Image (spheres, rainbow, N blue to C red):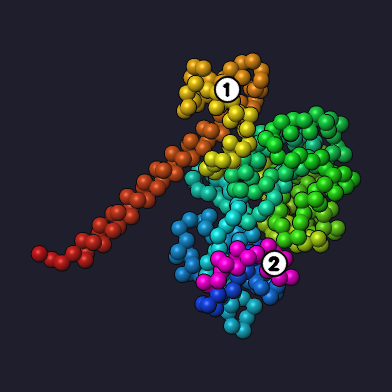
Amino acid sequence: MNLHTLGWDATREQEFAPLQSSGLEPARVVTVDKHHFGVLPRSGDFLLARAPGRFLHRVTRPAELPKVGDWLAIRRVPGEEKALVECVLTRRTWLSRKEPGREVEEQVLVTNVDVVFVVQSLDAAFNLRLLQRQLVMAREGGAQPVVLLNKADLCTEVEQRLAEASGTAGGAPVLVVSARTRRGIPQVRDWLKPARTVVFIGASGVGKSSLINRLYGEEVQATTEVRESDSKGRHTTTWRELIVLPGGALVIDTPGMREVHMWLATEGVHEAFPDIEALATLCHFRDCSHSHEARCAVKEALATGQLTRDRYEQFVKLQREFAFLEQAQAQRNYSERKRFMRVAHRSFNKQKPAG
């Protein structure tokens, strides 16, 4: 085990060079527990790193804290198998969503992944709308999405489901697989290259951990059977962990996400709806919202059946979510600027000489 097997390359080496003279060393995060992080440094020996107060003081929001997949600059604690986090290196890709609940805050799930395996189950839990949102999330973070339709052994309408998923995937590869029968597993392995990081996302019970176990060759992730009554799975994965597969690929499993609260997105939406984006170029108005304007090519395609009602409504719903998030984020930034100016003004008045 060394940095290069974990995905370290010449670009990372160049980024880290200015930090090396300060006695720091690079390490990759493989597990996270609040402000404590399991990391693998250049030596390959597992270390437990913690975020010291000076690091936490520089963090302005939770999304900046280290996540599984991050590269860190760490300082070893002399005489112990421990280290301190000094900084997080540049994130090339990431998966993020809105923090569940009312708080308008970004939650980064994992970082620096090359491929996102979006797992859907071909049983009663099959959900095209959830698939669409997961694809937007993957694309917005800059990674390559690949759809895995798992549990093919439990489905009698595989070809129909494949056609539906392919129509939703916006050009992303779609593979039919079965962790139980090994169907499609060789095609999944084609995406697993040495030092390449992949992540599995999907609702609880779709078989993410079972697929990882099949790829690894033994049970490295706990699994349980889904309930027959509603095809809902149990949460067997409760943390995110980076696992090195025998072939050298790096894989991250994630807890089940039955709902995906979208975070701010731009390119991810365009890439997820290429058909609607192509139609939008034909609209009479450049800023067409595709809702009430005259001579709207998207609405015309909807009326003629060229565009399905479900796909159109999903597109509009996502656009509204992003507009709300942008407005909420702008309001939050404005409030923070006002608070900063008040503090700065009070500080200035205290330092101002009398008279």
Disc number for residue 298: 1
Picture residue at 13% right of the left edge, 66% below the top:
354
The magenta stretch is 1-19
Q: Secondary structure at mark 1?
A: helix
**Residue 156 locus on image (x, y percent):** 86, 31
In front here: 264 or 50? 264
- Label 2: which residue? 4
Work out which residue is located at the far left of the displayed protein and give it: 355
Q: Quadrant of the C terminus?
A: bottom left
Is the magenta region chiefly helix, strand or loop?
helix
Picture residue at 30% right of the left edge, 54% below the top:
341
**Residue 64 locus on image (x, y percent):** 52, 58
Disc number for residue 96: none
Q: Looking at the picture, does residue 243 appear above or below residue 223?
A: below
Q: Quadrant of the N terminus?
A: bottom right
Tell me, yes or no, if residue 154 can be seen here.
Answer: yes
The amino acid type found where label 2 is placed reads His
The reply to whether dot 1 and dot 2 touch (C-beta < 8 Å) is: no
The amino acid type found where label 1 is placed reads Val
Residue 42 as seen in the image, left or right of residue 190: left
Picture quadrant where residue 150 is located? top right
Q: Looking at the picture, does residue 92 appear above or below residue 145?
A: below
